[in-house]
Each structure stands twice: as structure tokens, then as C-alpha cells.
Image (cartoon, helix red, strand yellow):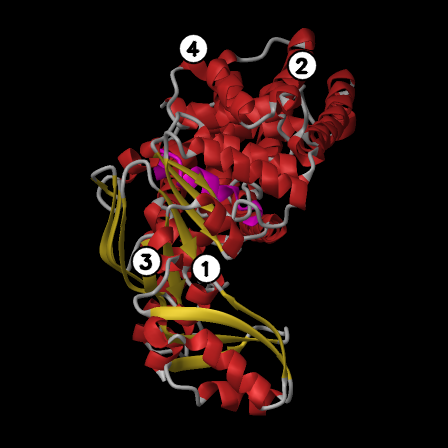
Amino acid sequence: MRSTWAVCKREFISYFTTPVGFVIVGVYALLSGLYFTGSFIIYCRITQNPSTYGYDAIPEMEEWMLSPFLVLCGQLLMFIGPLVTMRLLSEERNKGTMELLLTHPLRDREIIFGKYLASLGTLFVLMLIVGFHLIIIGSFTPIEPVVLAFGLVTVFLMGAAFFSMGLFISSLANNQVTAGTMTFGIALVSWILGLMGQDLPETIPAPDTWPAGLIRAAEMVYAIFRELVVSLPLDAHARDLAEGIIYPHDIAYYLLFTSFFLFLTFRTLESRKWRA
Amino acid sequence: MIQAQELTKRYGSITALDKVSFEVAQGEIVGFLGPNGAGKTTAMRILTGYSPATEGTARIAGYDVAKDPIEVKRRVGYLPESVPLYGEMAVRHFLRYVSEIKGIPRHGLQAEADRVMSLCGLEHMGGRIIRNLSKGYRQRVGLAQSLIGNPPVLILDEPTVGLDPSQIIEIRQMIRELAHNHTVLLSTHILPEVSMLCQRVLIIHNGRLVAQDTMENLVGPEDGVVRLEVDVRGPREKVESLLSELDGVQRVKLDGAGPCFVVEAAADSDIQPRIAEAVVRAGYRLCGLRERARTLEDIFVDAISVDEGAQV
């Protein structure tokens, strides 16, 4: 446990002894702040004159502004995340310091958890920025505590899940730019899939001329494809949670996603024993 | 203290280490000698638990490297060839960090960092950022990290490579002092370094251990063989042929790029006056004739050429 903490502490401090940490925090604050300011101004205008914006009454602040903002904060983590995770293991390998770690009395899991906890530490710093925005909202209007709590948990779970995938990719690459690019690419694909998933119809009609067996097969293939596109993207599970609606499968998804990639990272590090 | 039995390491079809066996007793300082790519680093990486052997076993202080890697790593201080350092850290923070992952109790972290800094002459460098240090000082920091926890075994992979002459002297002096209470396995391809520091030598070539003995036995006189340096001015082939034809001469070779011939002959052959006589009678100028001790370079070249001959 002490070794895990030592690895975590060194890694976390190294984010902020180089410009990397400040770039991450700065970009995240800028992007989330821009969205927040824009939506806050619009919401204020809606509250003054709802009918101008097509509303019969003032919309719920949680539903109109808070939940989308929290989902966006989670989505932003998918694009900022590669900057956090790309260096975790690939830099150690690239600089040769992996040899230092692996020839000292450290277990693989202590290295992996240490690194992962350091990335969660950075996530916590980013969450402080989200919290700062929530304090601003709270000073104008009371926020439903359940929505607030689950919103923050959602952002954290999304970030934690995405960072675990970034850690895994970092364990595969020898170069942090490669790791970052791969992680960013996956984030982009996941985001596009999420957008696609919102508009996909439940079923698509097959031509009547097709035999019944082929139609059933096509429907089954489409159903599987749709399920994957709807369920796989990380942000697809965030919307309900951010509105304070808890589905155990959403939380289970994030926890399983995180465990799966931590497990893969462990196996990758362990593979040196039979691969090298 | 260190036992390697039939260590073999294969990378696909390439055999980097081929059934290498050796032992290093407690308190010994042993040189691991070999040309680049001979397998020295591979063997050291296996001994430190960084990379597993394909076959064979390695034990450090009685612990099997494959079965008890954590126990082994607690007892080994390792300085890899390219010193692994975190450039953005200050020396003292880096050494505290290494102390922490080495399992030094929390209250003793600073004392341990100070101890190794003092051993390696880094007392005034504690606050310096590692990336700003000279190569010599970075090497010292690397050596300091290997000494954390006072491990009984030190494995040093080419500790003086890339240093300037004064830094080399300092690091060698440091290693000599460490050898008083550590078992040291030192890899190098600098032959004088081994002569200066080591009690025993392991010579590795093409992944195979081709010779191992104490320095005294290796450089001492071979049984019944005398080695002479003969400085003759004359046509090289003719002089070589003249010397080779003398009774009792076993081998004649040119000494590097110089004008001297090295003649190996039976010790009881009374060869020196006969060489002088033959050279003068042939009309060549004899500028020097003296007995030469066997150097480590001779042993190294002999061991490697015997190995290459065996492979052909």
C-alpha cells in the first residue's frame, strides 16, 4: 500500500512540476467555463421571458442547464483525458525508468494502481473546477441535492472509466504521443457513436422481397448493432445519472469498464514475463 | 550470494544467453566482461528480476529470482547501463522516492537519502534538479539509488560508460570502497577497469561463458609457457617465420599495431638467447627483448578466439 502511495504521489506531483498539469487544468477550465457561461446567460434570459424562447413556463434549472452541463463536463474528460493518461506508463518505458520500477520491490499492481490513483487525483482537481461552477449556480438558485450528488458522481465515474482505458493504451505504447493519439481517437469514435445512437430508429424496415429468414437475420444483426452503438459510448450512460435517475446498469457499466481496462493493463505489464 | 545455473534467454530464434552458470561468493567483486552484445546486460536483467530467463535458475541470497522476485529485489541494488532517473525531480526527492519504494520505514526516508548522498558525494546536490546535473553527477545519483536500503548485492552495468577520465576515477574509487561490505557484480567492456577493481572475472561472448577465474590465475604465468615481447626491425613475414621456426616456440603474433612480436614458448626452452642469436644472424636489428606478463586483454582475446574457433 505504501509503495502504491509512493508511486501515486510522485506521478501526481510530476503533473504539476511540468506544464502538463497546468495545461490540462487550464484547457478544461476554459472549455467547461465557456459552455457554462453561454448556457447560464441563455437560461437567465429564458427565466426573464420564457415565451420568447418557446417555453410556456420557466424550465427546471436542473433539467435545462445542470444535467447537460455535467454530461458535457464528462464528455470533455474524454478529450482532455488523453493528456492525463498518455504519459502514465509509456513515458516510464520511453525514459527507461520502467527498469527502475521493475527492479525495485514493487508488485505490478502497486505500479498500476499508483499510476491510476495519480490520474484520479488529477480528475479530482478537474472536479474542483466543476464544483466551482456549481457553487456559482447554487448562489443564484437552490440545486436539488440528489441531482447535484449524482451529477458529480457521473462525471467522476465517466472520467475514472475513461482514464482506465487511457492507462491501458499507455501501457501498450512506447511513446506518449502515440498513446495520446490512440486514446483521443477512441474518444472521438465513442463520441460519434454516441451521437449516432441518439438518432437510430428502433427497427429498420427490410425489403418485402427478402425471404422471412433473411429478414429475421437482418433484424437481429441491426438490433445487436443498435444495442452496441447505444450502450457502448461512455456518455450514453451519463444522461440519466446526471438527472438524478439511477439505473444500476449505468453504474455497473462504469465500474465494469474501469475494472476491465485495469485488468488488461495488469496483463500487459505482466506480459513481459512471457513475451520478452 | 549470487548463483546462476544454466541461464538461457531466447528472443525468438536468437539466443542471447546460452546456459550460463556461475557463482559469486559473499564479499566478492566480480567483473562481467564481454564485448557489446555479448549478453552481459541480459544476464544482469535476469538476476535483478527485470526480465525472466527462458531456462535455468538464478538465486540471490538464497532466494529464487523467478519465485521470490520481491525478496530478491529487496537485496539487490541495480545500476542499469542507461541510468533511469526522473529528470524533473530534485536529487533528494528522487532518493526519498526510491527509499519509499524500496520499503524503508517512513521515519527513516530522509536519513537514508542523506546517507547515500554522503556515500556518493552528493551532499551539496540534494536540491538540484536531476536534468540539470552533469553526466558524472547523474551517474552518482544512479549509483546512490542502487545503494538505498544498503542491499548486500550490487549489480552495476557499465557504471563508467560515457564519463570523462576524472569522473571514471571517482566512480571506480567509489566502487572500490563499496566492495568492502557488498557483493558486487560489475559489467564492463573496459579491461583495465576489471584489472583495477575485480578479484574474479567472468568472460562472456555470444551469450556463452567462455572463461571464469580469479585475476591472479588469469593473468599469472601459464603452466610451462613464457611470453616474450621481441622488437625486431625487418620484414614482418620473414621475421615471423624466423621466430616460429625456433625450437620450443609455440606461437608468434604481432602485438597490435606496434612493431613488437609476442612469442610464446616453452618455459624450459631457454629461448631468449636463441631468439637474439637467430635475429642477429639473419641480419635484422634487435631493438628489444623482454618477458611480458599476461594481460587481461590477452586472456580476453584468447578466450573469444577459442570460442569463435569452437563455433566454426
Q: Chain of mark 2?
A: A
**Image coords of residue B259 (percent x, y):** 63, 76
The part of the chain drawn in magenta is A94-109
Q: Amino acid at mark 4?
A: His
Q: Please tell me how crowded label 1 is: few (under 14), some (14-19), or many (20+) other residues with Cα within 10 Å.
A: some
Quarter holding the N terminus of chain B is top left
Task: Say whether residue A167 is left or right of residue A46.
Answer: left
Q: Which residue is mark 1?
A: B296
> Could you tell me which secondary element the residue under label 2 belongs to?
helix
Q: Please tell me how crowded label 4 is: few (under 14), some (14-19), or many (20+) other residues with Cα within 10 Å.
A: few
Q: CA distance from mark 3 to mark 4?
A: 44 Å
Q: Amino acid at mark 1?
A: Leu
Residues at badges 3 and 4 in contact (C-beta under 8 Å)? no
Q: Residue A137, labelled with which disc?
A: 2
Q: Which residue is mark 4?
A: B107
Callouts 3 and 1 on one subunit = yes
Residue A63: tell me if it is visible.
Answer: no
Q: Which residue is mark 3?
A: B212
